[in-house]
Image (cartoon, rainbow, N blue to C red):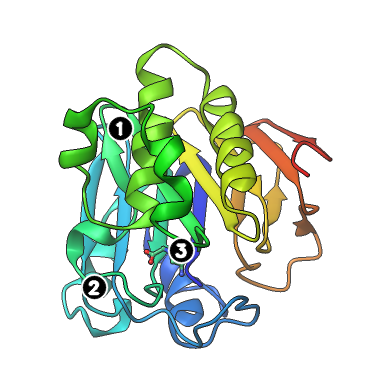
Amino acid sequence: MCRHLAYLGPPVPLSRLLFDPPHGLAHQSWAPRDMRGGGTINADGFGLGWFPVPVVYRSARPLWSDPALPSLAATTSSGAVLAAVRSATVGMPVTESAAAPFHDGPWLFSHNGRVDGWPDSVAGVAAELPVRDLITLDAPTDSALLWALVRARLRTGASLADALSPVVSLVAAAAPGSRLNLLLTDGRSIAATVHGHALSVLSTADSVLVASEPLDDDPGWRPVPECSLLVADASAVHISEGVFS
Ligand code: GLN
């Protein structure tokens, strides 16, 4: 169910994340190794966001079928990137606007997973949002609602971690069994939750790469434990375990 990644560090061509590694995001789109909760490939759209602006490029087509993407990725470099490939949850539309990254101001967001019992299970949680936010969701999907909940917290000044954590806790309580791997960046830091899906991290002295699946066989990749919250910048990674039940 969806694969996502975020990178902070020295500028790299986007192709270094998508196409060059043996198990880059392009490979993960058609040959993912660790799909859970349904779905076999991630062919229902993709998206890339890169800083400093940030610029977002999303599509409803499979990543591998976009003829412009290899040259775009080879010639565009960035030191802060969030990218995702999508496997739509049954019943959710395949549209460009349903593909991550979701974007507002300096923030890029992605969700890997699904909200069980959607949408009725989270009607109470959604009720905390202004009606305007509900009727202007990017798409009628669980991920778009999660983004609206996270964004509302960011707009009040919450840190990336403080925007993600309560949303996972609230939605997990309202919709048990949900898979809620959330990924958020403002171009300087990354926050990510591990709740129902895999996540790995590779850090060096001046870079960090967080991804649903390792992109290569570098022995530095570390799995992030279930129920953890990861916060990272280019020089440090902090993992809080047991944050979610
Ligand atoms: N449930 C979300 C959607 O349909 C995310 C799907 C996924 O992680 N595969 O867009």
Q: Please tell me which residue is depicted at 47% across the width and 73% down the height of the picture.
A: 20
Residue 94: assigned label:
2
Which of the two discs, 2 and 1, sits closer to the camera? 2
User: Which of the pair 139/215 is nearer the observer?
Assistant: 139
Name the residue type under label 2: Val
Instruction: Count every numbered label the image shows and give the total.
Output: 3
The reply to whether discs 3 and 1 touch (Cβ–Cβ < 8 Å) is no
Q: Please tell me which residue is depicted at 51% across the width and 88% down the height of the picture.
A: 40
The quarter of the rendering in which ligand 1 is drawn is bottom left
Residue 238: assigned label:
none
User: Which of the pair 128/142 is nearer the observer?
Assistant: 128
The local crowd at label 2, few if under 14, some if 14 to 19, many if 20 or more residues have their Cα within 10 Å, is many
Q: Please tell me which residue is depicted at 47% across the width and 69% down the height of the picture.
A: 2
User: Which of the pair 245/156 is nearer the observer?
Assistant: 245
How far apart in space, not on screen, are marks 3 and 1 (Cα)?
18 Å
Task: Say left or right for 83 vs 68.
Answer: right
Q: Is residue 86 above or below residue 166?
A: below
The local crowd at label 3, few if under 14, some if 14 to 19, many if 20 or more residues have their Cα within 10 Å, is some
Please tell me which of labels 3 and 1 falls first in the chain. 3
Counting from the top left corner in percent of width and height, residue 62 is at 29, 80
Counting from the top left corner in percent of width and height, residue 50 is at 32, 44
Which of the 4 image quadrants contains residue 135?
Answer: top left
Which of the two discs, 3 and 1, sits closer to the camera? 1
Would you name the residue on which mark 3 appears?
A: 16
Name the residue type under label 3: Arg
Task: Say left or right for 4 vs 106.
Answer: right
Counting from the top left corner in percent of width and height, residue 116 is at 53, 62
Task: Say left or right for 59 vs 11.
Answer: left
Residue 52: assigned label:
1
Name the residue type under label 1: Pro
How far apart in space, not on screen, are marks 3 and 2 (Cα)?
27 Å
Which of the 4 image quadrants contains residue 103?
Answer: top left
